[in-house]
Structures are given as structure tokens and as C-alpha cells.
Image (cartoon, rainbow, N blue to C red):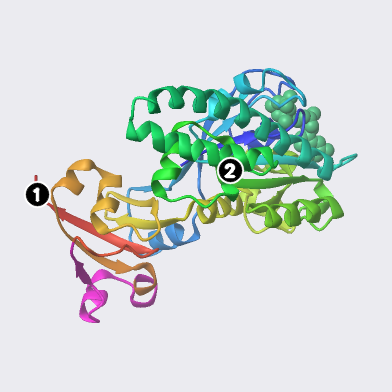
Amino acid sequence: MECGLIGLQGVGKTTLFTALTAHSVAVQVGSMKPNMGIAPIPDPRLAKITEFIIAQKVIPATLQVVDLPGVPTGGSNLNTVLAHIRNVDALCQVVKCYENCDPASDLGAMDGELIVADMVVVEGAIEKAGRTAKHGDKDALKRVEVLTKVNELLEEEKPARDGDWDESDRAILKSYGIMTSKPMLYVANVSEDDVNGESEAAQYVAKYANDNGGESVAVCATLESEIAELDDADQSEMLESMGLIEPAVGPLARALNTLLGLSTFYTAGEKEVRAWPIPKDAPAPQAAGVIHSDIERGFIRAECFHVEDLFALGNEKAIKDAGKLRSEGKNYTMQDGDIVNFLFNV
Ligand SMILES: Nc1nc2c(ncn2[C@@H]2O[C@H](COP(=O)(O)OP(=O)(O)OP(=O)(O)O)[C@@H](O)[C@H]2O)c(=O)[nH]1
Ligand SMILES: [Mg+2]
């Protein structure tokens, strides 16, 4: 899963990137270079599995993060900035909610810029697809139809995500990298004395997200970037003293999972215990394919039990004795929290 950090200039994107990926990036305000990194997603269930199944390695699911240069309002080079993230699955918009801030104006400006950037793309694309459609090309006709609907929304200053799209429409939107069609997580970058986002500014962002089909979280980017540099013991102590339960990447990644409709399954053996993100309601072979295409191709069945069964019964033998070890076929719909062993033959 990949997400792009966007926002106006100097609102704390690079600071948040540093916190999420624990990469130390020399914070260069105004830099035009995107930063890329990987954030491990903290997962309390994964940690608990390893209390029951001792493994040599524990591998969490990860979030790929791209930190972009700030978007100048009324900027002509916006499409160059956004070109780096046309292919991401979701956007995180950082909104300044500390010191002198005006989230209402910033949100309006940033979302306005995205609408304008999409209009530029859509106009060009309609023209091009229109020319191909003239020769009776069905695909091109479909593209023109979708793009025209997007254009109507944009002209009403609405994001493309407000439209009613089916799966094939979504594939078209994705192929053109329509920014306003991507799921949006609004990140209120709050001050150190408002880590739970209770200030008026942070509350405004939460309401705006809710009204605009997005999700929101409150994060104090500077504090989180300091926390990310500590070792585990100091980290827990610092979090506790700030009244936080876990680093911000936890709530942030969970909000993204919700937006993207993802769930998690696990594989667990002596070698490694690992978390795998999959689309909610994915059938078993598709989940197997996330591990390796051979396992999907040669799928025989999935032997699985649920994490809660492990936590309640303690080991695989007890799970089996209790009749909770299931053998599922190719039509099985994966459940969030399944621990799976795929049997396959290639
Ligand atoms: N007080 C306070 N300052 C912050 C916070 N987050 C970022 N800053 C400061 O704001 C300045 C800009 O932070 P960056 O993370 O570079 O912002 P940016 O959005 O990446 O900036 P551009 O890439 O230039 O658009 C830095 O001096 C940070 O120290 C915060 O939560 N609280
Ligand atoms: Mg930056």
C-alpha cells in the first residue's frame, strides 16, 4: 500500500515523513525532491501472536510513503509536483493546526488546487480519447464517458471521489491518476499540547474530513519525529508521558486501511510470523497470491484458524482438538485476523 503526503508549503509533511519512516531526512523546507520510505505498521495482534508462536523473524505489514514538495497556491508547476504520486493508492493531506493556522483556508486552497490539477489532466484526456472514440473504439468511448462525468464534478468544484463509480470506472480513474478520486486521509498536524486533537483547528479538520468523504487523524509531527528516534523502552516512556498509547503510524495506517477497505491475514511458523494486507472479502486464492503468484496458481486449500482462537486456546494442537482448525477451499472469503497455511501444488 502506498500513500502520498501532500499539503501546502511548510505544514510539516517532511517532519511527518521522518516520524513515519524513522528515516532522518534533513528537513529542507522548500525542497523540490520527493522523499520515499517505508513505514512498518504497528500491529498489536501480530505482537501477541509471537507470544504464542515463537519465530525467528517477525515481519509487519508496511506502508510506502512518498513525501512531496509543498504545493504553492496558484502554482503553475503543480502537475510536476503531483506527477510523483499519480500512482499512489491514497493521499494523506497534512494540515497545519499549530501556532498561527487557518485550516479552513488551507483545506480549501489545497483541495482547490487538486481539482484544478485534475481538470488539466481530464481536459487533455477527453480530447485524446475522443479522437480514438470517433473510430468506434469501445474502450475509448467508455473512457470519454467516465472522464466527462469527472469533468462535470470538477466544474462544480467537487472531487471525483463524490461520483458513483463501479470497478471498471475506478480502474479508468486510476489509470489517469485522477488525484481527487483517491481516498483522502486528512492529518491535522497539531501542537505538542494538543496531541489528542481537541483544539478548534483540529476539530475543524475532523469535521471537514467527515463532510468530504475522508478520514482524519491528529498527529503532532515534531513530537512523533522525536519519538521515532528513540529505542523501544524510551519510546514507551515518552509516549506514556505525553498521554499517547502508540506512535502515530498506528492510527494513521489503520485509518488508511479503513479508507482503502483492507484487512489483514497472518502466516505463522517457526521461521517467521508475518502480517499481510489484502482487500476486504478477498477469496483465499487471491490472498495466497499476495504471498506468491505460484501459491495462487497452484492453490489447493487453506488451513486456517483465527487469531482469537490462538489467544484463547494457546497452541495449534488445542485449536485442532477444539475443532477450530478449518480447511477452506478456493471459494472461502478471507476473514480479518485469519492465520493461514496455504497448501499448493505447482
Ligand atoms: N511547532 C511545530 N512546528 C512544526 C510542526 N511540524 C513541523 N513544524 C515546523 O515547520 C517547519 C516546516 O516543516 P516541514 O516538515 O519541512 O514542512 P513541509 O510541509 O515538509 O515543508 P515543504 O516541504 O517546504 O512544503 C519546520 O521548521 C518544522 O520544524 C509541529 O507539529 N509543531
Ligand atoms: Mg518537505
- Return the residue nearer the eye: 28 or 223: 28
Task: Where is residue 30? Give x, y as percent.
Answer: 74, 20
Q: Ligand 1: which quarter?
A: top right
Res 329 quadrant in image: bottom left
Label 1: element kind: loop
The residue mark sitting in front, 2 or 1, is: 2
Q: Earlier in the sequence, mark 2 or mark 1?
A: 2
Residue furthest to the right: 100
Label 2: element kind: helix
Q: What residue sits 66% from the left and 35% below the top?
A: 115
The relative height of residue 203 versus residue 103 in the rendered view (above or below) is below
Residue type for callout 2: Ala
In this picture, which residue range is highlighted in magenta? 310-329
What count of labels does the image hold? 2
Residue furthest to the bottom: 322
Instruction: Provide the residue designation for mark 2.
Output: 160
Which label was assigned to residue 18? none
Q: Quadrant of the C terminus?
A: top left
